[in-house]
Amino acid sequence: MPISGARDPTTASEVLVELATDEDLEVRYYLALNPATPIEVIIELASDDDDEISGVASSNPALPADMLIALARHKNVVTRATVARNCSTPTKALAMLGCDVDKHVRRGVASNPNTPPTVLDTLARDTEEEVRAGVACNPMIPPSLLARVLSLARHDEVRILAAVASNHSLPSDELASLVSDDRPLIRMAAASNLRLPVELMAELASDEDKYVRKALIYNPMLPTQVLLKLASDKDECVRRAVTEILSLPVELLL
């Protein structure tokens, strides 16, 4: 069947090329998802009339720069937002998309690690919380800009504060203030931060919220002694999470 062939990465290239003109939207959709689909077919599908197909194809990092620049002007918002998130999108296109009228497109640019600092600086002052949260979670944001995003965030802008708390670029003193926040969601984000100091990890291991303690367990930098402390946690779901890390039967931790 055409659908199974479009999904199968072992399908011959010439067959995948033929399927690019199939009238069935589902066939072309799975073709866009198939990692074995030739790049010339992906380029063709990126301009597909169907929004979902165009969006999926536009996410392919193998797309050439000139194609991504062209897609940055696409009338379809889904396609532009996908291009904004694409790690191969040229800075020229990212700068253009950073001024897009749609907040989802600007959010994609804000979180893209290749977005220039000058564009991030502009997006850090965006009127939409969602966009500024994208800046806050950008892994390549300069620490000074991240600190500014934090200082400008309102108390009720939880998405921004949580994104800042999880960002590895955040200085440890700023991170400490978020560990003490009264909202579990923000403490959960801080618990996942790879740069969280050991003393703060120990503090969160005794957090009153079980989901904060559970988030801490999955931090790859968590010291063994803190992990073992959580192995005797009062909550079963926390103990079970520890067994996933230690690969021990849960009965041994009771």
Image (tube, helix red, strand yellow):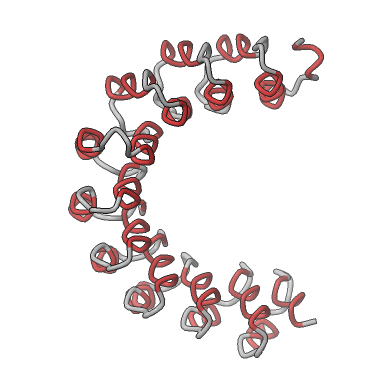
**Total marks drawn?**
0
Q: Indicate the quadrant containing the C terminus: top left, top right, bottom left or bottom right.
A: top right
Above or below, 160 against 68 in this view is above
Going 46% across and 71% down the picture, which residue do you hit?
58
Going 52% across and 11% down the picture, which residue do you hit?
206
Going 65% across and 90% down the picture, which residue do you hit?
23
Report the side of 248 relative to 235 (left or right).
right
Residue 220, percent from left and from top: 53, 27
Residue 141, percent from left and from top: 28, 43
Going 66% across and 81% down the picture, which residue do you hit?
16
Residue 50, percent from left and from top: 53, 81
Above or below, 100 against 160 in this view is below
Q: Nearer the viewer, residue 38 or 42?
A: 42
Report the side of 26 relative to 187 (left or right).
right
Q: Nearer the viewer, residue 119 or 157?
A: 157
Image-quadrant location for residue 34: bottom right
Residue 179, percent from left and from top: 39, 21
Report the side of 134 relative to 62 (left or right).
left
Q: Indicate the quadrant containing the N terminus: top left, top right, bottom left or bottom right.
A: bottom right
